[in-house]
């Protein structure tokens, strides 16, 4: 005689298995749909993205330093608000005066620390600019130097600065990009901590994903960022 409870257990297991299968199928469909959205957005913004990357190669020395300042302000702060601050610092000639940047950073998180970072970077401007263009280090070594020697700069900020000043070959992994990578099925989850080892691991995953969807990785981060905002920025 068949045990009723055993039959129910088997039935429950079959139902749960089917539910899991359905969730997996839905997840797979969602990933594929998101990837198609990425390709569609890229197709519509491709010319604008390439133009933006070209503009990064045409900066003068002051422009390069202000890009460093921009990257010092962006951690856990809006890129648009950070850019607005940089414009005010430019207007007041922060580089060549004794200007206190703090009053201009009121809308930036951790503005006390970031004020200190800006002033330190300005006091070491010639040294930092020299190392950033060093012929004795490759691009990855320059990034490591910046992340290790400039207060307020980590792997992401160093990558961002170098990309924004015309370098190619690095990936900018902020929280928005990482969330999009999860949604696209490129990684399983957004890591809680992003040390150098984990950054390099995810950078490799990003480059591998860019090959899969046939979009140059130097352009893909602008695509993913632009999908969140609707426009191409930096």
Image (cartoon, grey):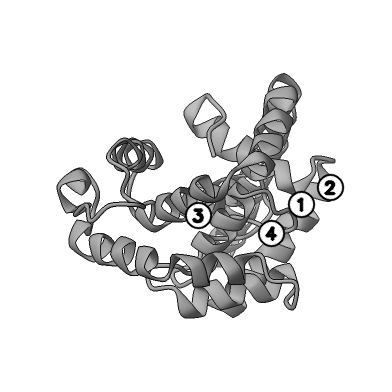
Q: Residues within 10 Å of mark 4 (few under 14, many from 20)?
A: many
Given contact means CB atoms under 8 Å apart, are the residues at marks 4 and 3 in contact?
no
Which residue bears the numbered disc 1?
209
Q: Secondary structure at mark 4?
A: loop
Write down the residue under mark 2.
212
Q: Are marks 1 and 2 in contact (CB under 8 Å)?
A: yes
Q: Which residue is mark 3?
A: 174
Q: Position of residue 121 (x, y in %)?
A: 38, 66
| Pair 2/4: label in front | 4
First-in-chain label (3 vs 1): 3
Image quadrant containing the N terminus: bottom right
Q: Could you tell me which secondary element the residue under label 1 belongs to?
A: helix
Q: Earlier in the sequence, mark 2 or mark 3?
A: 3
Whole-angstrom CA distance, mark 2 to mark 4, is 18 Å
- Residue 201 to residue 95: above or below: below
Rendered location of residue 49, percent (x, y): 68, 31
- Taking the spot 64% from the left edge, 72% from the top edge, the residue there is 142
* In contact (CB < 8 Å): disc 2 and disc 4: no
Q: Residues within 10 Å of mark 3 (few under 14, many from 20)?
A: some
Residue nearest the observer in this picture, 63 or 49: 63
- Of 74 and 10, which appears nearest the observer? 74
Image disc number at residue 82: none
Horizontally, residue 121 falls left or right of residue 67, namely left
Residue identified by numbered label 4: 170
Whether residue 40 can be seen here: no
């Amino acid at each position: 005689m068949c045990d009723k409870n055993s039959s129910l257990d088997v039935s429950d297991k079959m139902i749960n298995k089917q539910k899991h299968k359905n969730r997996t199928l839905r997840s797979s469909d969602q990933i594929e749909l998101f990837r198609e959205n990425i390709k569609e957005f890229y197709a519509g913004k491709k010319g604008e993205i390439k133009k933006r990357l070209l503009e990064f190669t045409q900066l003068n020395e002051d422009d390069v330093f202000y890009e460093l300042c921009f990257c010092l302000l962006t951690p856990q702060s809006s890129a648009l608000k950070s850019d607005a601050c940089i414009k005010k610092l430019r207007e007041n000639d922060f580089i060549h005066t004794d200007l206190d940047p703090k009053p201009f950073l009121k809308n930036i998180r951790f503005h006390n620390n970031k004020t200190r970072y800006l002033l330190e970077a300005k006091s070491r401007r010639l040294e930092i600019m020299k190392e950033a263009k060093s012929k004795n280090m490759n691009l990855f070594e320059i990034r490591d130097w910046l992340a290790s020697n400039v207060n307020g700069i980590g792997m992401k900020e160093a990558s961002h600065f170098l990309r924004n000043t015309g370098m190619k070959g690095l990936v900018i992994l902020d929280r928005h990009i990482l969330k999009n990578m999860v949604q696209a099925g490129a990684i399983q989850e957004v890591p809680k901590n992003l040390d150098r080892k984990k950054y390099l691991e995810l950078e490799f995953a990003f480059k591998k994903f860019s090959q899969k969807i046939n979009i140059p990785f130097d352009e893909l981060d602008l695509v993913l960022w632009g999908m969140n905002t609707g426009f191409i920025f930096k």
